[in-house]
């Protein structure tokens, strides 16, 4: 199957017979072995049409009638990849990438997706460079049609349109509430079963699910702090007997919200630190039973994970952790696109930027830390390897399709690398400052993986 980039242009014609005509450069027809006036199948995402082929002198050009362009969701035109499969007599154009977002503000024509609009623009630019077509939609755009979706695309401004079900669907929903909507789950199911759409990052991960699954993988066990579902006092008592420091984490929490640090002091008092919006609230309890009495009401509202506490490398007494972005790219294999260090803010024991944390390169974070100089180089190599190994293990052990994962890691004071959590919806705003017109490697890799999945 030969693949090439072509310029697809929409033309207006009043001739009824031209409505299902595709004009293709003669050079491309010879390459594909298609005779003029031959009829073939045209495929663009879920869009299908039987078309008659007419030759053009202009190289690298495909023209479609206005009615065909409307059915494809194309505006004036686009630079897209095209291939011809002889066995099915099908010209495939695209690939078509759909991105489901949590919400949009149609009244804000410059920033319909709020803080993530710049990322969306970046994704459009990366898709154009790769010869792909990308559009965006929200749960409220899902209708009753099985083959089309209303949404947004960008061409010298944001425009609404109706587009075919994509070849590849990237789930960027940032709320479990939206992801669990019946309409969204039905869309995912129909996209996969009816149209053969590849859906990736199709579900959220919770902390207990990840750690339970990874315990079965020998390659990553050395990176796992002891961790259990926090089911009651017996678990707290057993963990406290083994570890001086413990962390209680909401299994579906994010941005460091709701985390509690419990540390046994030399006097036997238990010092608890609660991560809150304005800083860290500190309370001392005379016994473990008192600790449990204080935190147990929270167990009725949400589920928690209890985890072995670690003595992390720090900068000026502020702990550091690392966010690795692991992605699949053009070959479909896992790799590390970036790793940044995140230094906890003053009066916080979590490093999230929302809690006043700051970011630095992995190298700068380690060089400014209290980790012994001789162990810093090995720590950098270990962080990269651990991120890839953990991403592979998640992919292997959890029944869902992932194309990118945010892997949160930490380095203890001896240089050992530990897993903190895995995020299936890594933020597009907290690792690097977005610059208008710039395309980050992470966005390029995302589009290249979509191309790999679509085989275009």
Image (spheres, grey):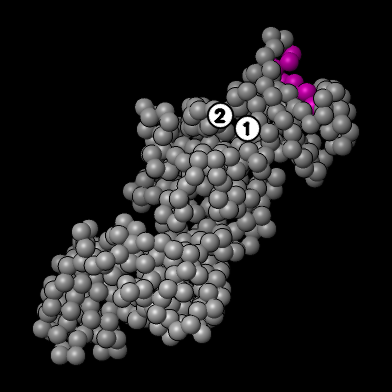
Q: Tell which tag, 1 or 2, sits nearer the viewer.
A: 2
Image location of residue 196, percent across then percent down: 61, 45
Q: Which mark is residue 47?
A: 1
Residue holding disc 2: 155
Q: In the rendered image of this protein, does residue 343 appear above or below residue 190?
A: below
Can residue 290 be seen at all in this image of the molecule?
yes
Label 2 CA crowd tier, 10 Å (few <14, some 14–19, many 20+): few
Query: In the figure, 369 relative to 14: above or below?
Result: below
Q: Which residue appears at 43% of the width and 43% of the height?
A: 116
Identified at 41% across, 34% down, the residue is 111
For the residue pair 72 and 358, the one nearer the viewer reads as: 358
Give the residue at x 60% y 24%. 75
Q: Is residue 306 highlighted in magenta? A: no
Q: Which residues are magenta?
A: 16-24
Residue 390 at what x, y percent from top left?
Answer: 51, 71
SS assignment at label 2: loop
Left/right placement of residue 178 relative to residue 401 reads: left
Helix, strand or loop at label 1? It is strand
Magenta region includes residue 20: yes
Q: CA distance from mark 1 to mark 2?
A: 21 Å
How many badges with numbers are in the image? Answer: 2
Q: Position of residue 73 (x, y in %)?
A: 58, 28
Which image quadrant: the N terminus? top right
Q: Earlier in the sequence, mark 1 or mark 2?
A: 1
Crowd band around label 1 with a 10 angstrom C-alpha radius: few (<14), some (14–19), many (20+) = some
Identify which residue is drawn at 37% across, 61% down.
Answer: 358
Q: Quadrant of residue 274?
A: bottom left
Residue 223 visible at all: no
């Amino acid at each position: 199957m030969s693949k090439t980039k072509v310029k697809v242009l929409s033309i207006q014609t009043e001739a009824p017979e031209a409505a299902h005509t595709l004009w293709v450069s003669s050079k491309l027809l010879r390459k594909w072995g298609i005779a003029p006036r031959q009829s073939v199948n045209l495929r663009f995402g879920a869009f299908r049409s039987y078309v008659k082929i007419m030759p053009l002198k202009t190289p690298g050009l495909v023209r479609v009638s206005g009615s065909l362009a409307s059915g494809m969701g194309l505006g004036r035109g686009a630079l897209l990849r095209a291939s011809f499969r002889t066995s099915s007599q099908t010209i495939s154009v695209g690939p078509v990438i759909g991105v489901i977002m949590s919400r949009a503000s149609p009244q804000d024509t410059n920033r319909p997706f709020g803080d993530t609009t710049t990322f969306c623009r970046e994704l459009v630019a990366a898709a154009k460079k790769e010869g792909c077509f990308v559009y965006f939609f929200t749960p409220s755009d899902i209708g009753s049609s099985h083959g089309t979706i209303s949404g947004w695309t960008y061409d010298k401004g944001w425009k609404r349109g109706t587009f075919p079900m994509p070849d590849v669907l990237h789930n960027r929903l940032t709320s479990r509430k939206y992801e669990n909507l019946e309409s969204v789950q039905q869309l995912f199911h129909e996209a996969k079963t009816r149209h053969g759409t590849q859906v990736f990052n199709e579900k959220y991960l919770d902390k207990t699910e990840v750690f339970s699954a990874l315990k079965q993988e020998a390659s990553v066990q050395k990176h796992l702090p002891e961790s259990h579902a926090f089911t009651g006092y017996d678990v707290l008592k057993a963990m406290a007997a083994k570890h001086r420091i413990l962390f209680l984490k909401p299994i579906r929490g994010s941005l460091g919200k709701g985390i509690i640090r419990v540390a046994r002091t030399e006097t036997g008092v238990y010092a608890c630190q609660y991560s809150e919006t304005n800083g860290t609230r500190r309370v001392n309890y005379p016994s473990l039973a008192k600790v449990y009495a204080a935190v147990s009401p929270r167990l009725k509202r949400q589920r928690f994970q209890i985890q072995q506490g670690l003595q992390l490398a720090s900068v000026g007494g502020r702990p550091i952790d690392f966010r690795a972005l692991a992605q699949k790219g053009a070959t479909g294999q896992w790799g590390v696109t970036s790793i940044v260090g995140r230094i906890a803010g003053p009066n916080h024991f979590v490093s999230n930027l929302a809690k006043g944390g700051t970011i630095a390169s992995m190298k700068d974070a380690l060089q400014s830390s209290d980790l012994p100089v001789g162990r810093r180089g090995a720590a950098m190599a270990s962080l990269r390897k651990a991120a890839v190994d953990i991403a592979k293990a998640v992919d292997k052990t959890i029944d869902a399709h992932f194309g990118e994962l945010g892997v949160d890691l930490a380095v203890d004071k001896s240089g050992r690398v530990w897993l903190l959590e895995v995020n299936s919806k890594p933020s597009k705003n907290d690792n690097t400052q977005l610059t208008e017109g710039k395309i980050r490697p992470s966005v390029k890799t995302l589009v290249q993986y979509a191309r790999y999945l679509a085989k275009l």
